[in-house]
Amino acid sequence: MTNKKFLLPDLGEGLPDATIVEWYVKEGDTIRLDDNLVSMETAKAVVDVPSPVSGKVLKLAGAAGDVIVTGTMLAEFELDPNAPQRAEGQDTGHHHGGAGTDAPGPGDKVIASDEGGEISETDAPAPQAQGDGERADSGTVVGAMESSDAIRSEQASSAGGVKAMPAVRAMARKLRVDLSRVRGSGADGVVTMADVKQAAADGSAKAGAASGTAASAGTAPAAKPTPAAAPAPARDAAQRTQLSASGKPMRTQPPSVSATGQPEQLKGVRRNMARVMADAHAKVVATTLSDDADIHAWTPGNDVTVRLIRAICAAAKAVPALNAWFDGDKLVRTLHPHVDIGIAVDTDDGLFVPALRNADVLDASGVREGVNRLRAQVMDRSIPASELSGHTISLSNFGMFAGRYATPIVVPPTVAIVAAGRGRHQITPVVGGFEAHKVIPMSLTFDHRACTGGEAARFLKAMLDDLALAQ
């Protein structure tokens, strides 16, 4: 019998790893070609990975919650010579290497971006199979990545007293399942994807429904809540030194190595956000301009988000330099004739930036409909990965929560991001006296490598002028 190792492929987003959500098989099972093998969570989606072969499952790499590095072993199979197999070189839909080889050819390139656009290229081949000569399905490894079978273990979050993966929580929201009423079948009581689907199918944990009693027939008793940790006793005056009690400065000791919280490894969206922000901080020469948009002339019914998007489009037409991509390695700037605006959407799982395509040709109702659709798809995690990349400029409307001005982060390859703060009224001098005008604080961060200060200031001025119009 021939054995085959299946390495985790690039799932189409250029990310270095993915998290196991749920296995559809167990070791010893028989699986057929293209049957679902495992559900994997990336920074932007939950993806079902099909089996690349027909045969017996010999080994599975890790359990739900484990992080698998792209290009490392995901599963090992014993091939069934009597069952259908994919021909060497046949496209699997997961961006594997060239036909009949374990690695991309010398001319193959991988172009990827964590947040959209072409930002880097590499000619580095994927790692070759080692050891006993078995062919390993290497997939596409982004950048120079060392191949190994290392697995980093992760823990499900315990928000609301329920242990569950972010993808499971998203599925529960989508299926309207109350996780607090689902009995977890995973290790340590973790609620799995199968638990949520079963609860949705039998209607035993509908969101908003009154919970039954533990004594009800067929109803599992609720899990006993874990008691909260007792607060640390306050240090009384006798425990304080005379120096500290006197209120004078004193040398303090380093904090204890013990921690009160539970360490949690970042995964999925937050894991990707950490990488993207660190990369942006290291590469971009960020400069921020701030000013107030006077919206005193607005007539009733104006939509703040719609007006902000319209103002960005007007400014991009007046000053194209900020509606652009910049390759800092090659010193190449790409100006875009269209405006695809990345709309920052904050969720419990982390930050998403879906793209509102061709915002410059949409009317007010089209913009509002597009924004609503993107936010709804983000919240239920149904948004396609293609909608989370390729924007030409970004907008963060953080003022809907709090805050006036900000220094938003420019994520390559884009060169600018606009941020709107919380509106307020201020006293404005006018002919004959003073008036109270409503203003929106505006912040514009731009990559000074690709834009001049004058271009950024003119862009911001064009936005302020458009926002000052009545409608």
Image (cartoon, rainbow, N blue to C red):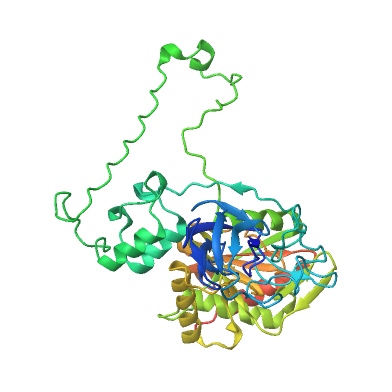
Q: Quarter of the image containing the N terminus?
A: bottom right
The percent position of residue 39, horizontal first and vertical second, equals 50, 63
| Left or right side of 371 for 132 | right
Q: Is residue 426 visible?
A: no
Q: Nearer the viewer, residue 251 or 58?
A: 58
315 horizontally vs 46: left or right: right
> Residue, x 49% and y 46% (percent of image)?
155
Residue 89, position as x, y percentages in the image: 71, 76
- Please tell me which residue lies in front, 293 or 151: 151
Quarter of the view holding residue 461: bottom right
Q: Using residue 267 as the reference point, say whether residue 462 is left or right of it.
A: right
Q: Which residue is at 47% across, 37% downward?
A: 261
Where residue 324 appears, as percent x and y from the top left, is 72, 75
Q: Quadrant of residue 204?
A: bottom left
Instruction: Tell me the residue at 47%/14% (across/down).
Output: 240
Residue 256's place in the image compared with 284, above or below, is: above
Res. 192 visible in picture: yes
**Rendered position, 426 above or below 221:** below
x, y percentage for residue 85? 61, 74
324 or 30: nearer the viewer: 30
